[in-house]
Amino acid sequence: MKKIFKYIFAGMAAMSVVACSEDALETSPSSSVSGNELLGTATNALVSLNGVYRAMYTAGVSNSSNTHQCFGITAYNLVADVMGEDCIMNGQGSGWFWYDCVYNVKSRYTSTGWRSYDMWNGYYTWISNVNYILAEEETMSGSETEKNYVLGQAYAVRAYSYFMLAQMFSRTYKGHESEPCVPLYTEPTDIATEGKGRATVEEVYQQITSDLDKAITMLGNSGKRKHISHINEAVASGIKARVALVMEDWQTALDAANAAISKSGCSIGTGTAVTGGMNDATANNVMWAAEIIADQSGMYAGFFTHMDADQGKYGASARKQINKLLYAKLGTNDVRKKWWNPQDEN
């Protein structure tokens, strides 16, 4: 049972994991990048890859309905949080994310307008897009550094997407290796591609870890990162650490996490870097970020609209709170306690 402690959550939601076992979704890819000639050079392929990153925080890309709660990976991270035990909503508000929070989702498994379709279509769209880039690996023109930069990111995006799909549409890895997970596509697909059946949990995680190892190797030989939105060797190592945690491979998780820290050059945030809203992509504790310019803002369809309780938007009527038990585990001098206000009664 969730034990509500009325502290107002003002920080950024962390990525967490949930699982379900329903399989009543289409297994055919829904869309893909077209025109292989556009991906024949590393320079052109990077333009396409930038489009994938842009789609990761754009409302309406994965779902034309309910776009105010369907706006890419920050929405999916918030879904994972409210479906867990640590982040609690104090009310239904406008309804966004509420049905995720209270697990009232079964009647919408086959709907094309709600969460299951949103996440399924979103991640498989990105997988389809990067599969077209990866199909050019043997023939792509450009220097080895340029090709590694693009292909390494494509492998990382595919691994990350399958990792999130596996957590949302199957049971966890340990003890369920032979159970059905999600369909695996590693080749270019289009609307005519015949849908595959579900691969096993073990097969999907083997693909994830293989892709991440390739990504880390390539990105380690890809030169300087061009933009904070691009996945680099450190970010890929961080994803590998998260995957290893789910697989309960503790040593790999530790090694990958240490690699992520050392390769990133980042340091633990202090002071306003932790309490100032955590919306600065240039902060020294940020490994991977999206810089959203004004004309690309989702307005109401965005993470901060749902998290900020002080702006009179969705976050004001459906406040995100911390579980009492988790708050109690924070040390007296833990700066993260400033993310909540124990005196606020709302």
Image (cartoon, rainbow, N blue to C red):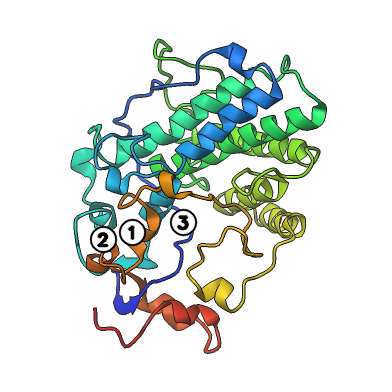
Q: How far is disc 3 from disc 1 in space, using C-alphas? A: 20 Å
Other-residue count near label 2 (Cα within 10 Å), few / some / many at <14 / 14–19 / ≥20:
many
Which residue is tagged 2?
A: 314
Q: Can the viewer see residue 181 in this picture? A: no
Give the residue type that dot 1 points to. Answer: Thr
Query: Which residue is at a point 26% across and 60% down the rendered structure image?
Result: 314
Q: Can the viewer see residue 127 in this picture? A: yes
- Under circle 3, the secondary element is loop
The numbered disc on residue 201 is none
Give the residue type that dot 2 points to. Answer: Tyr
Which residue is tagged 3?
A: 16
292 in relation to 193, above or below: below
Question: Which of disc 1 and disc 3 is earlier in sequence?
Answer: 3
The numbered disc on residue 305 is 1
288 in relation to 333, above or below: above
Contact (Cβ within 8 Å) of mark 2 with mark 3? no
User: Where residue 149 sits: x, y (%)?
Assistant: 72, 34
